[in-house]
Structures are given as C-alpha cells and as structure tokens.
Amino acid sequence: MAVKRNRWLVGGILFIAVAALLAVSLGPLIQAAFNPHGPGHNNTNAATVAEPDRQAELEGRANGYELVLEREPDNQAALEGLVEARIGLGDLAGAADPLSRLAELNPQEPRYAVLLAQTKQQLNDLEGAAQTYRSVLTATPGNMEALQGLVSLLVVQERPQAAVGLLQDTLKTAEQSNKIQPGTIDVIAVKLLLGQVYAEQSRYDDAIAIYDTAIQDAQTLGGTPDFRPTLAKGLILRETGKEDEAKPLFETALSLAPVQFKARIQQLISQAPINGAADGTLDESAPVEAPEIAPETIDPEAPAESPAPDAAE
C-alpha cells in the first residue's frame, strides 16, 4: 500500500488530467534518479545504476565541483553541477546540501526548493520535505509544483483530510490573491487536484461535484477553453461504471483541447477501465487508479532538454 500511495501523483490517468496538461515539470533529472528503471521500480540500488565508466566520470566531475566549491562556496554553476553529478551517481543524500544552498541563493526560483523537498521525501525526511514545500507555498501560494508535492506527501502519510484541507484553504484565498495579482492561483488546477484526492479516498461523488464546479469556472472565466475538468469528470465516470455518461464528456474534451493534446487524450480515453467498470464489476473498495505513465508525458510542450540545471558544460 505504501509503495502504491507513494506513486499516486507520479503517473496515472487522473494525474494527466490534473498536471500533465498544466505544463508543469517536476524536475526530470530528480525524477529519473528516484525511479532509475522507470515508474514503480524499487530504487534501493540507485547508486549502482551508472555503468562503471559513467560512474567514474561522474565521480570525477563531482570531485572537481567540490574543489571549486572549497574556493567559492556560492559558485552556482559548481553547485548545480555537483547536484547533477551526485544524482547521476544515485547519491540523493549527497545532492541535498548543494540543493539546499541553491534554494537559499535563489529564493525567487522555487524550483530548487521543490527539488530539495522531493529529495528530502525520498530520503524519508518527511517533516523536512513538508516544511520545504510549505515555505514555497508561503511565498507563492499558487505554486502547483509545491502544492502537488505537499498533497502527494500528505497522501503518502495517509493524511488525506489534511490534503483536502490544504487545497480547500488554497481555494478560499484564491479570489483575493488573484485580485492582487491575476493568475497567482490556478483555481481550476487546484480543483482538479482536490478531485483527485477525493478519488483516492473513493469519494467519487465529491470528486464529480468539484469537477462540475471546475467545468463551470472554465466556462465563466473566459480565455482559452479548458478541457481538463471535463476530461477528469469523464474519467471518473468511466472508472465508476458510467461509460455512457462519460462518452459525451470525452467528446467535449477532445473538441476543446488544443491540437497538441488530442492524441494523448484519445490514448487515455481508449484505455480500458482500471477497476472492472467496463463490465459493471467495479471494485468499490479500490481507489480509482491508472497505469503508470512516464514523467516525460507530463509536459507535452516542454523542450526536449531537461529544465534541470546543467553546469557541466
């Protein structure tokens, strides 16, 4: 159960509906280190992943960056290079300190803090991870990377009500925050994430209800048509055995979606229901889940190169 819950936000159909279409990248380099052989693989032997020649090269690079940092402790290129080298070696504990320093040096760039929180979580420093996520959210309440990370952590700790409370509180402050600075909090994205937490608890009616409000938001807020809540509701309906109600939602989602998402959405809705819903034998005790999906599918618009720092050049 713990392993399954620990992966609930890494992949899966509903995560695609929530985050994959948000153009949110959670650090492919860190993700790869956490799951070196793909989603769901036990990463106990992560340090042995690199081939001997590659490992020797990474060790040499790490030593070189350490020498630079002895002379210039705040050299960001060296800090970034050291993080990359240590992650390549599977040494997450060794990556934590330079990541922490990068976060301190770049308070305006929350990605470093998010990656630090992810690293702490993988090192089982759950309290440290939670504090780091919360520090990001204090400075930028609408940061979806930190919000998703903290929600995931709370679910892993089997504290879904705390995750629900966090998201509900975020929604309560959204209107005021967006008045002060438009676009601070993506209300629809937060509601989609809340719906996913409800689904994790088998609270399907609550999930559908929050998706309905998100659909209304998408219609009233104007701007680019937002297909995400329609797709998410359809996926829940299908997984709960209501295929006939889901089909028109899938059609609507496809009609609303930008062209770059249509093929991926079609692939998702063509997959068989996970919990036996297609034949009416839904396992009511099981949360709505989906097959693991590679992290690179999370951001179809992302450039081919990872946004993670690369100071090796």
Image: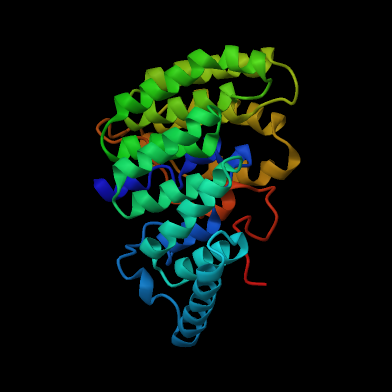
Q: How are the colours assigned in the image?
A: rainbow
* Residue 279 drawn above or below residue 209: below
Residue 169's spot in the image, x, y percent? Answer: 44, 18
- Quick check: can you spot residue 14? no
Q: Position of residue 132 (x, y in %)?
A: 42, 40
> Residue at the front extreme?
71
Q: Give coordinates of residue 31: x percent, y percent.
A: 47, 56
Residue 20 shows up from this direction: yes
Residue 152, located in which quarter of the rendered image?
Answer: top left
Q: Is 99 placed above or below 169 here?
A: below
Q: Is residue 264 left or right of residue 26?
A: right
Query: In what quadrant of the picture does the C terminus appear?
Result: bottom right
- Horizontal and vertical percent position of residue 134: 42, 33
Q: Residue furthest bottom?
A: 53
Q: Residue at x 47, y 59 (%)?
A: 98
Q: In the picture, residue 207 is in which quadrant?
A: top left
Q: Nearer the viewer, residue 296 or 161?
A: 161
| Total residue callouts | 0
Near-viewer residue (60 or 272): 60
Residue at image point 51% right, 47% down: 104
State the residue at coordinates (47%, 30%). Answer: 193
Q: Nearer the viewer, residue 178 or 69?
A: 69
Q: Is residue 42 left or right of residue 227?
A: left
